[in-house]
Amino acid sequence: MRTRKTIILILSLLALLPAALEAATYGDRENGQECFVVIIESRNIRDGAGTHNKVVGQLKMNDTIFVARPVILANGNEQWLQVPGQGFILYNDTGVATVPNPHYVEAEEAPRFNKPTRTSSAVGLILTGLFILIGFLNLSRNERYRARFQNFWGAPDANGMKKLFFFSVTPYKNVVLIFITILSVILGSLVSVLAIGGVTWLLFMIIKYLLLAIMWVGIICCVLGIIATLCGVFYGLIPAIIGGLIWSKSDWFENMGASFQDWGERFFSNLNLFSFTWDIFSQWWWLILLIAGTPLILFLVFALFATLNVGFWSGLEWIISTIYGIRNPCPTCGHKLTVWGDRKTRLVFKTGSGEHPVGLHPSWYGVFHHRSPVTGEKLPTMMLNGRDKLTRICPSCNTDIQARSGAERHVAVVGHRAAGKTTLIYKLLKNLQVRYRSVITFTDKNAGDIQGVLSRIPENGEIFTEQTDFERIRAIQVIVKTRLIPYKLHFYDIAGEMFNSTSLDEATKEYISYFRNAQTFLYLIDPFMIDFTDLDSADPEIVAWLADEHREKRMKREFYKPQETFDQFTELLRYSMRDKASGIRKLPFNFVLVKNDIGYLEHAGIDPSDPEQLKAFVYNTLGLAGIVSQAETTFGQVNFYTVSAYRTFEQSKIDKLRTDLLSQIDLKID
């Protein structure tokens, strides 16, 4: 390493010799701009600056003259260029062109010559290219230099993810290193080319002084040999004779030394490497910088493009989600889900046996896909290219989600425990499946179970469903494919146990925050479960009929007070929508009388297809005037329906409920 540095230092010093020699021979370049004046048509040389002056010579087309310091005189509208030693030529038209003289034409060749001395560009370029090649080959064999490029595109982050090389610091460092390397090799090659002139001149100068040294050694040997011989030392004749021969040729040694000096200077002058390198810098410095800086420029351009690309696709998905109301709430806890943020607030996508360590969206880890550090598979980063096909984990309730995305429509079914909420939802699902089979699909990890339940439901058969688990509140999700961005219909089956207590704690309120997503409510009323103790305004006759022992045996009743259930429901709703309370007034609300197949409407003489008669039945007959009035002041629109799970679609009035329900949430199928 030390030897290499010494060689580089010596070559750098030798590279300065051509500059010093040229400056000494031809003067300081800055003291006057040497230039060529190229004659492209014949010009008369006159002894004065004017056409009336005597013609003393002529320059022919393509003749070239050397002017150390241009002198231009004005004579009226004419300009005259002084030709050193000869006179003046007319300079104010297109017949004369001035170009820089980068080659230091020797003064003794001025003022006129046909073939100016020029650098051997071919030799200079060959030498430069050779040294560039040698420089790169030398670097390629350097282990420390090659080690810098082992992770050229950047190493993975601590989370195992590898950034796009545009967003990693390492490639930029490597590109800057390449820039410095290219620039250094080019400059080094030019210094080496300069050193050739210096080395050659120095070599010839060394030879000159070696010859002079030999001459003086011979003279000294001759003198000392003669003295030794005179002193009686016979062997002194040998150096005296050899020295005498050298002394006799002293003129030859001096002339030969001068010749070597002249050859070195002529080699330097003819090859003119300093001028060549100066030409390279003065004329092509921008190209050298462009070549060296191109990788860095390309990196910056690609990084800008990738950044804009990330912003564009992220913005496009945000716009589509906003326009179509795609909020992706968790079907279990109702919290709004996002792919942004840290592990505690964003969706976590599963990959293989692990979790994807970062948010799955266009970012510096990938625009359209991320590469999983666990399995190596490509994971789509947007809903537009299939991200919603992946299994993800809700950060709030930690449950798995397997559902497609779509323009969301949300229906919440509310009622006391065993009021028939799950039964009604499955009846509606069966109705949708029968009426719109070609466009209805289920999107949930429990889709198979839902399909199995629906396959066992006849149009007029009894539905057996399990009681909704209080700890597993879920939304049954249905995809309705009637347009490019499909609808995603959510049915929230709210467990009745929520309304068993007289108050709701904060944890429970947060747990069912999905009320915020609801666009309409179905509030189920089962007359057989109403506790009429405090309902003095209820019709005694219908109360007695409902209390019939025979019917009591048929219905395993669990009595509840409708006012308490409704109050708890509205309290929960207001808490869930506390930051947008005014939005409640815009929501539709639907009272649904269930189990009408028992005959209580027929007994009361109510037409099940007449909403006004149904309202009167709830308001007057069941004595729920307070609930109806409260609903009418809380919600924007209050409707009344009746259904049965044991009758056909037409008889149970489920078609009417389904049609109005889809209209309320603006879901267009027909």
Image: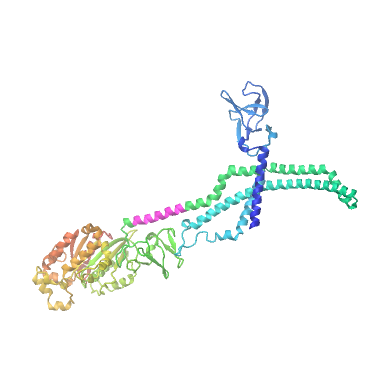
Percent across and percent down for residue 319 are 34, 55
Percent across and percent down for residue 549 are 13, 78
Residue farthest along the front direction in this orientation? 231
Q: Nearer the viewer, residue 319 or 149?
A: 149
State the count of labels. Answer: 0
Q: Nearer the viewer, residue 74 or 388?
A: 74
Determine the image quadrant of residue 335.
bottom left
Q: Residue 319 colored magenta?
A: yes
516 to 34, vertically: above or below: below
Whether residue 542 is visible to the viewer of this picture, yes or no, is yes
76 to 424, vertically: above or below: above
Residue farthest along the top direction in this orientation? 52
Q: Residue 81 colored magenta?
A: no
The part of the chain drawn in magenta is: 303-320
Q: Is residue 69 left or right of residue 151?
A: right
Q: Main secondary structure of the magenta part?
A: helix
Percent across and percent down for residue 608 are 16, 66
